[in-house]
Amino acid sequence: MPPLARLAADLTAKLGAENVLTDPLARTLYEYDGGVDRAQPDLVVFPRSRDQVAAIVRAAAAAGVPIVARGAGTGLSGGAVAREGGVVVAFNRMRRILEVDVENARAVVEPGVVNLELSQSLAPTGFYFAPDPSSQRACTLGGNVAENSGGPHTLLHGVTVNHVTGLEIVLADGSVAQLGGKAGEALAGAWDLTGVVVGSEGTLALVTAVTVKLTRLPEAVGTLLAIYDQVGQAAETVTALTAAGITPSACEMMDGFCLRAIEAATGAGYPMDSAAVLLMDVEGLREEVEEDAERVEAICRAAGARSVRRAADAPERELLWKGRKNAFGAMGRISPNNYVMDGVIPRTRIAPVLEEIEAVGRRHGFRIGNMFHAGDGNLHPLVFFDERAGELPRALACSHDIIQVCVAAGGSITGEHGVGIEKQDLMPLIFSDADLAYMERIRRAFNPDGLLNPNKMIPQSRLCGEIRGNAALYREGL
């Protein structure tokens, strides 16, 4: 019996036939994430417990088969794509909230819990989970941990790693370990291994439970929409807010090109004739929110905003944010395909970098749209293209040039989407050979045989063939 057939039979016996996908057509649903890379896994399995995850890892490791963890598949860098085939471990059936400890502002959840559903379930307690990726209605906590996800409110609250104090993990040999806990590791004086695993994109371990920090719901939130006739004026506002010592909880920028498609799709109340808008939140005590909103409005007007609107109530606030949260889906009105990048730049460089990005688009023959987390300089330029016309390779080249513009401005290759496949070979732009060698040593300490999410993050030239050289040994069919 071929190795994969034996593994499929073994996992079916352990998990039940309803939790193992072998049919090629069914497996096509798991060959991609939210990015552009595709590769079909050889098996897809759906564990329901930590012990089942450990059994899967032990069986796959014994067979020498790669293992790729998957949440909701909303990632944008190919992190959940089974590049070398093997077993995709889909966590969407492990979605229990195991504990809510309001007294200590902590919750323990399984990795398949949906981000927004956690906050919704916590609402009666007066707490919520702060990281809010645009995909929060679908993305899972396990995926957030893998990618160290952010979101619009990263500016004030930070990214996922700032809200995770403990992890239960299954290591590459199938053993189980607990990192941190309700107090966290750093507070106890131990090595912060939790911080090492968060953002490692499934290359170090599989997460089976997450201890998260809960944030108290603010007494009041004010939402402002500043409208501009020039993109540069919106960018200048961000710099002026920083100089004034004001930190909104969110500060999002959308250019007019994207704005019109978003408004047509969602009816959020955005102006159809503006060059750009800033969508901002301020939060805290009611009196503080009122004072901060007035200061923000004054700074926006001084920077050239033609008008500043404040949401009158919660429904209007939710509608304004609905437009931003559903923005990527609305881009289908502009082009058959779009490719979104994830560069980071200093906030003071937003205006000149946007000009450079537009020039890159012209050079490659593409229109570029911009909607991004302006407050922390996390850009998301969209390259609009038509895959049917064979434009994808040119769109990828354009996007890589955009990332190089961000790095040249003193920025980074990713702020929240991760490295995965997409930026794997761009890592040398910001890391030295010594840096990459150190990362590889850490990866091998956790994942010595390279079976956990192989051929990701570390540039291919440094991977020494690892699992790729042995792929033929197990890919003999089912």
Image (cartoon, grey):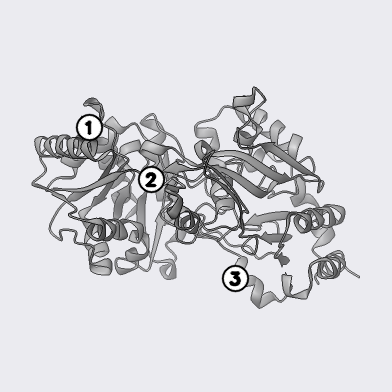
Q: Nearer the viewer, mark 3 or mark 2?
A: 2
Judging by the rendered image, the residue that carries numbered circle 3 is 29
Within the image, what quadrant is residue 447 found in?
Answer: top right
Q: Is residue 424 left or right of residue 238?
A: right
- Cα separation, mark 1 vs mark 2, equals 24 Å
Three-letter residue code for mark 2:
Leu
Residue 37 horizontal/vertical position (percent): 55, 59
**Residue visible at 75% across and 34% down in the picture:** 445
Element type at mark 3: helix
Q: Is residue 456 left or right of residue 36?
A: right
Judging by the rendered image, the residue that carries numbered circle 2 is 217
- Cα separation, mark 1 vs mark 3, equals 44 Å
**Residue visible at 47% across and 53% down in the picture:** 122
Mark number for residue 241? 1
Q: Nearer the viewer, mark 1 or mark 3?
A: 1
Three-letter residue code for mark 3:
Leu
Element type at mark 1: helix
Within the image, what quadrant is residue 292 found in?
Answer: top left
Q: Is residue 83 above or below residue 402?
A: below
Residue 34, visible in the rendered structure: yes
Residue 405, visible in the rendered structure: no
Residue situated in front as seen by the camera: 249 or 119: 119
Q: Is residue 281 left or right of residue 63?
A: left
Which tag, 1 or 2, sits closer to the chain's start?
2
